[in-house]
Image: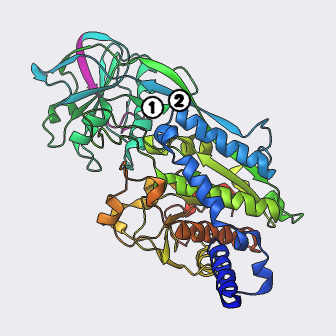
Amino acid sequence: MNKQRSLLFLAILATTTSAFTQPKTNSSFAKLPEANMPRTSVEAHIRFLAADELQGRKTGASGNMVAARYIAEQFRLLGLKPAPGQTDFYQTVPLQLVKPTGSGSLTIGGTPLEFKKQFVVIAGPPADLNTETVYVGYGLTEGADGYNNRNVNGKVVVAQVGSPEGGTGGSMLAASQQKRRLAAEKGAVALIELYTSGTMPWAYVTQALTNEQLSLASGTQSPALPTIWVDNAKNQLGALKESGQPVSLQTSGRPLTSVNAVNVAGVIEGTDAKLKNEYVMLSAHFDHIGVAKPGSPGYSETDSIFNGTRDNAMGVVGLLTAAKAFSEQPPKRSIIIVALNGEEIGLLGSRYYAEHPLVPLNQTIFNLNIDNAGYNDTSIVSVIGLDRTGAKADIEAGAKAFGLSVVGDPAPEQGLFDRSDNVNFAVKGVPAPTFSAGFRTFDEELMKYYHRVADNPDTIDFNYLLKFCQAYTHAARLIANRPTRPQWSAGDKYEPAAKALYGR
């Protein structure tokens, strides 16, 4: 009987301790909140955020707002405060829904182009135009690579897609808005952009731009100017670089409706009288891609919900873990925790925050972002920008405390640094790596779950999730407590922006 009782006691003890990560470390570390986080806490968060009832958390949909409400109320429960000047935890992100064009025809120099295959309508009202073209380079300036005193009144402006610096799809669309505004100011009646970028195949562009799109609403009224992208990958429309080409354009336009969305932000004040005026920003996006429609990829009669457990409910749970730990024992610097929206549709929430920060960016000394595609190695965390952003030792120490190693910048061919929310802070100068679940390559294990309906909570290794969240939290604590600010590596492409932002 005594032996049975001893075995029962050991079994209960094993069950209890398995719910915690027990790092082998000194007693002061063992007293930190993140060292004593129960597995049930992270499991409950992720089972809610990635539940079927949230319908994939698509930006603009009700499930997305339910997720935002959950995060905000967790902040309230933990005693976080709204950011300065805010009355609640929401930062409104003004979006606009652009519906696809029903019909269109375009003839240039007597040659008709095929709608949706050779050209797409990306913005603007209905049009019925017969005029001629004026080529303006990239169309972003008044100078030699722009308008250069050309008269475009009543004509169709032709420009190259994007900017001379290149960039992502989001930056090309942002540049298009600037061109549209300038062209409208100068009296143009339409804008045609020549798509020659190698960053995305034209077939991908046509698919993306012939569906409904969510984008940031501009602060001013968007000019009513029809805007067309045409395929010029092989310079087949090189003649358009010569002004005076006859052009005929008819389009039913792209209707706009307003959509409200939010980022969710809470603040924990630091304990040091001087350093509390500096902020470490912790971020992760909480949106995902919604529900597959019948006939679309991912749809089946048994499951059509993209739960987004790894991408990126896992990241949000990291934020909530940090919020709990720092609410119980704040670090020296202040912490602003921001759950970002609209990442899946072009990093929109982070772009809006970077332009409308809730605490000044020159007081935001670091951004530790979380984003995930999935994981294929539960012995590590992967950090994009580990060697570039000045906090390598802190991040490695944070992971080591919970038995994890760190791999920096796996899969460099994917260009991941510039594909997540961190890049919108990096371009402003803020050192901003992305902390990701452990992977070494983009392999079948990642792609089995990445943007798949199979990515549901029951497929998660909850013990690894706990260690991941604890490592993230402790790394953030070490960064927030360090005596000096992290700095970009010398010569990094974002270092000049940092010097401009911080004046050093």
Q: Is residue 425 visible?
A: no
In this image, 45 relative to 32: left or right?
Answer: left
At a point 57% along the width and 59% down the height, the residue shown is 369
Residue position for label 1: 214
Q: Main secondary structure of the magenta part?
A: loop
Residue position for label 2: 95
Residue 440 found in image quarter:
bottom left
At a point 74% along the width and 48% down the height, the residue shown is 75
In the rendered structure, are the residues bearing label 2 and label 1 in contact, judged by CB atoms less than 8 Å apart? yes
Magenta residue span:
130-145
**Residue 442 to residue 228: above or below:** below
Query: Which of marks 1 and 2 precedes in the sequence?
Result: 2
Q: Where residue 455 appears, x then y in whole percent?
A: 41, 53
| Real-space CA distance between mark 2 and mark 1, rounded to the nearest whole angstrom | 6 Å
At a point 25% along the width and 22% down the height, the residue shown is 133
In this image, 26 relative to 183: left or right?
Answer: right
